[in-house]
Amino acid sequence: MTPFLDLTDLEIAYPPRRVIQDVSLRLECAGIGCLLGPSGCGKTTLLRAIAGFEPLQRGSIRLEGVELSRPGWTLPPERRRIGLMFQDLALFPHLTLADNVAFGLRGWKPAERRARVHELLRLVGLDDEAQRYPHQISGGQQQRVALARALAPRPRLLLLDEPFSSLDVTLREDLAREIRAILLREGIGGLLVSHDQFEAFAFADEIGVLREGRLLQWDTAYNLYHQPANRFVADFIGQGVLLPGRIEEGGRVSTELGEIDGLSPVNCAPGDAVEILVRPDDVIHDDASPLSAEVVERAFRGAEFLYTLKLPSGARLLCLAPSHHNHALGQRIGIRLDIDHRVMFRQENG
């Protein structure tokens, strides 16, 4: 089956610097994806290339089997059937909400244009606000107007460049879920650029983690969390620490907290030093356990405390415990490991 969006071996450069290197990914069947990474990793450059604003030095971009870009040739942005939703929204302050949405429909017949604007404002829940101006509505409502304007020409793919970054965390995630539902209802693919993993989790089916212009892993949120491809992904997605260990005979790994079963990294042998990814939900507070650790930090999260614990060696772990287990700094508490997804890496200095 032809992928909906297909990026193959992309390289983008601002000579002499290569900004994007060897990036390949596929988004299936008008799917919804996210490019996730720290500032400066190249995710916005990649989005701009898909939109047609950046030329390729190598590779190709295809949408529904139609080539959009290759080295030396780029289909103009206005012919790509790709919508854009930017961080600054770029709403026209002197135009009503209806006129903002209608801006991209020049050339449509007046009756068709009015019907499309009404349809979209109803879709985003603003049909009663059509004659208001952007400064008269909230930030979340402005986001919905920007979405309606981007969807107006009926694009096949919507690109979103950190459009929620000016909103508070709860509203960002809520709006991401709301826009996802609208895209699915309309049968439009979506690709979001973000540095916020929870926003990505709320929005996307598949997520790509970028670092220094390279795509480290393109996968579901579940697999990024439980089966990270390398240390950077393990550290960037979720919370956790890397606990030192040593491989024993039979593939078991000895650690300060006892032996752990699991798959050893490739090319590791008994005696090799490794690091095991331990998430906060892998560390169980258990007063009956012979193992204990000192509480050195704690963060109240309503139903839970996130404890930072120090082991006798000085190594630290994170532990999620119900908030009725209220332990003071300096107190020692019993713990045990319960790791369902065993992820380990060869120790870099080992």
Image (spheres, grey):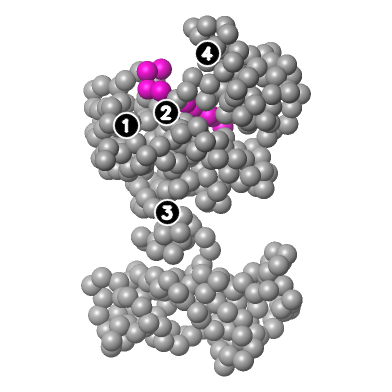
Badge 3 amino acid = Thr
Quarter where residue 70 is shown: top left
Query: Whole-Å distance between the Cαs marked 4 and 2?
Result: 16 Å
The C terminus, quarter of image: bottom left
Task: Specify the segment rendered in magenta.
Answer: 78-87
Question: Where, quadrant-wise, is the N terminus in this rendering?
Answer: top left
The residue carrying mark 1 is 64
x, y percentage for residue 229?
Answer: 36, 60
> Which type of secondary structure does the marked residue at label 1 adopt?
loop
Which SS class for mark 4?
Answer: helix
Quarter occupied by residue 25:
top left
Label 1–label 2 contact, CB within 8 A: yes
- Dot placed on the residue nearer the N-terminal end, 3 or 4: 4
Query: Which comes before the other along the chain, label 2 or label 3?
Result: 2
Q: What residue would you read off at disc 4?
A: 105
Image mark for residue 156? 2
Q: Are marks 4 and 1 in contact (CB under 8 Å)?
A: no
Cα distance, mark 1 to mark 2?
A: 9 Å
Q: Residues within 10 Å of mark 1 (few under 14, many from 20)?
A: some
Mark closer to the chain start, 4 or 1: 1
Which amino acid does the dot numbered 4 rest on?
Answer: Leu
Q: Nearer the viewer, mark 3 or mark 1?
A: 1
Residue 76 falls left or right of residue 257: left
Amino acid carrying label 1: it is Glu
Mark 3 surroundings within 10 Å by alpha-carbon count, few (fewer than 14), some (14 through 19), many (20 or more): some
**Amino acid type at image mark 2:** Arg
- Mark 3 or mark 1: which comes first in sequence? 1
Q: Is residue 135 visible?
A: no
